[in-house]
Amino acid sequence: MYNSSRLALYHFWVAFAVFLPAVILGVWQMLMRSPLPAPFDDPNTYYASVTLHGTVMAYVVTTFFAMGFGYAVTATSLGRPVQGITAAWIGFAICLVGTLMAAAAVLSGNSSVLYTFYPPLLGSAWYYTGATLLIGGSMIWVVLMIVNMMAWKRDNPGKPVPLAMFATAATAVLWAWSASGVEVEMIGIVLPRAYGWTVQMDAGLARTLFSVTLHSIVYFWLMPAYIAFYTLVPQAAGGRLYSDTMGRLTFVMFILFATPVGVHHLFADPEIGVGFKFIQSFLTFLVALPTLLTVFSTCASLEIAGRHRGGKGLLGWIWALPWEEPMVLAVGLSLVMLAFGGGGGLINMAYDMNLMIHNTSWVTAHFHLIFGGAVVIMYFAIAYEMWPRITGKPLLSKRLARWQLWLWFIGMFVTTVPWHITGLMGEPRRVAIFDYSDPLLAPMVPLVVLSVIGAFILLASAILLITVLVRSQLGDTVLQAPLRYALAVNPPIKVPKALNGFALWNVLLLMFMIVEYGYPIGQFFVLRSSVPVYEVAPQPTALGVR
Amino acid sequence: MTELERSWTRIGWMSFAVIIVVSSLLGFVVLSRYQPNDEPLDVWGAICRGLGISFDKAASGGAQPALSIPTELAWTQATIDQIRAGSAERGQQIAAACDACHGGSAPNPGHLIPTLDGMNAAALFKQLADYRSGKRLWSVMNGMAQALSVQDSADVAVYFASRAGRLQVDPDQRVPPGGHGLRQSDTGARLALAGDQKRGIAPCSACHGPGGYKTGAPALSGQYAEYIERQLGSFAQGIRHNDIYEQMRAIARQLTPDEMHAVAAFYGAQDEKLARNEQSLAGR
């Protein structure tokens, strides 16, 4: 792994170190919302906990994991050391400081604004500064990924960039576009108010800017999983990648369609006209295309492996796959969760059907199933694949790892299926207490209790994950086979420029952004719709003035 | 550039154009036209609606209800700056007149005169403004307030806010004592801390404390129960109507006389009430 081992390991450590506490918070939140007794029975703690759980899972775990994975892929796929290693460590430090600042602000009870910030709610300046540093620090990683890919292209003229590196650089490009929304919101609107340089906030503008990030960040989260689908899964299954071009096309389409669709998170907001809501809903359906391509390609790669291993008949190849490999098991479980979660997502992205489930626990259930389930289970598999390569110590053990993956899969379904149903029954999300004696809410009780049971299964799985990683870390060093990426059935010899770089797609995305977001953002400079803020922090009420 | 390269660029730009044209036509011309209860809009109207610009083509023909404005004050930054500019020293001189009735030692037999020591400045400032403009009616106070300028009101509001007294305002206390409001056995405590979801009654404490305080809402912990009860009755009957968006009238109309009494008693004697509730919760 050349010079990237320690870098990747530190990033993974941070990601998994914050993961377990965040899972515990999640379980407690489920308990708090349920009719069962919960410790620290207090709504304000609940909102602080929601903020911390969301911030940690959405920003910290994902960003650190993606960065660590990116460094490891850069070194291994290009077969040479990562350039700019010092800058990478500086980026790591900035992200870590940002994380600690944000966590301190939330724990002090001064920033229960949820991870979506919700202006004109206003939390502590520490929280926003921390979040800005975390996201800003990750931009160093973005630059390094692109620089490394470009340097390799310069040294290897005419050769196709390895798919794993191409996909990682695509993730970086996507994240740069995605993060631009939240960074502009923070630096232009929220931070000046949090530090007291301005007196009001334009909530509509802030929300619209955040929507740029809101959906594309999801694709930033799932890119490591998709990279594994294309480059690690076929190898682990003992086969070949079905199509290299399909992989390139998938990642290019994510760059194109992940960002100009965020307004579908604002369907119920008054500040955007119905025309833009429809257009972005329309584009959201196009984001399903790369996922469908990926499912097809992954299944085809698995079939190649299964038949290579002697599987016969229409479906016989499925049983011939090496299911004892965590990576193969994880991809099977992941695709099942992806099917259900993606199906639910079609409801969310449809302009009119969205109104049925807006702000209900259906939404929470959806993104837990698809991100917490389908994507995070691949994070686990990647960690199991990477850990021996980084530490030089074998995984202890594959059996425990399989248990962990199965428990996560079962726990996620037991949690989210009832959660979807209570959402359809009208249960709002992000609410701390419910009066279950109400005849409208009483039928939800068995479903809510079932969800809590699922949450505890997830907790057991998370503990198992940490156990496996720590045990492996403490084991003896044994010589490990190097990380190999799957070969394509038809390995690329010469690929068109458009699929070996991002210039064309960046220009097209810029055009999409101008058409899709130019007016929705520009209108606020005419409307001048700033409002006073509502501070979350305890107020000097003697004056009663904010 | 080879033919292959050119075709990728062409496919990219063609797709972009087709997606934008088709989705824009559907979004701005077709779907924006149709309305639930009215005739479809013309194309120009549909495009404006799609952009989020809406306008009525003609005034409604029916009779309009008389415009009623609950208060002449709005919580703009200008108002808040006015209050912030108040001076407690000047306020103290003006408050000498207030103390004749609102002071701790003043005769207040029925407890119908509220205590003001520790009251939020914004709440006091708004009530003085409403008395001055006649939006809240009480002959003595209308006369008093008309004698005060806006600056005087801010001064006296800031002065009372700085004075310690019966009102218990604890800015650090964000949590209702006793945890879940829903599990409070006392009617007053339950309404104050949890409200009543079935009737759409928000918890009093969300705006009046303990726990949350909103701009312009007076802190109630320690206020005289008799005064609170009378105000709830006045809101319910519409005698008092200076609440923005009818927030208080909408809630008070839903309360029974017994519930008004219970809520008033909860706030009026907060310490011992809460202590009792905590005991009952602990014994649960």
Image (cartoon, grey):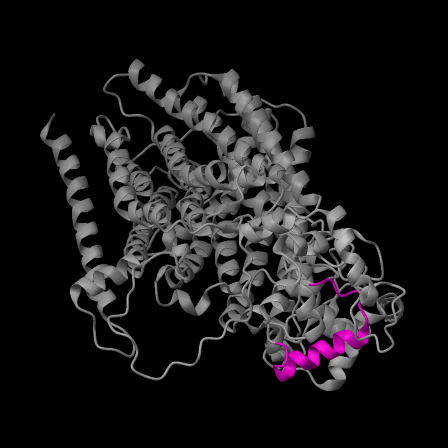
Name the quadrant of the N terminus of chain B: top left
- The quarter of the picture where residue A398 lies is top right
Name the quadrant of the C terminus of chain B: bottom right
Which sits in the foreground, B153 or A286?
B153
For the point 59% across and 32% down, which residue is it? A98
Specify whether residue A256 is in view.
yes
Q: Position of residue B95 (x, y in %)?
A: 77, 57
Name above or below for residue A412 compared with residue B87.
Answer: below
Which sits in the foreground, B174 or A239?
B174
Which sits in the foreground, A508 or A131?
A131
Q: Is residue B13 magenta?
A: no
Name above or below for residue A82 compared with residue A188.
Answer: above
Which sits in the foreground, A431 or A75?
A431
- The quarter of the picture where residue A5 lies is top right
Q: Position of residue B68 (x, y in %)?
A: 49, 75
Which span is picked out in magenta?
Answer: B218-240
Q: Position of residue A131 (x, y in %)?
A: 55, 37
Q: Is residue B225 magenta?
A: yes
For the point 78% across and 52% down, which residue is it? B92
Specify whether residue A442 is in view.
no
Left or right side of B273 for A92: left
Left or right side of A328 for B131: right
Q: Position of residue B237 (x, y in %)?
A: 63, 84
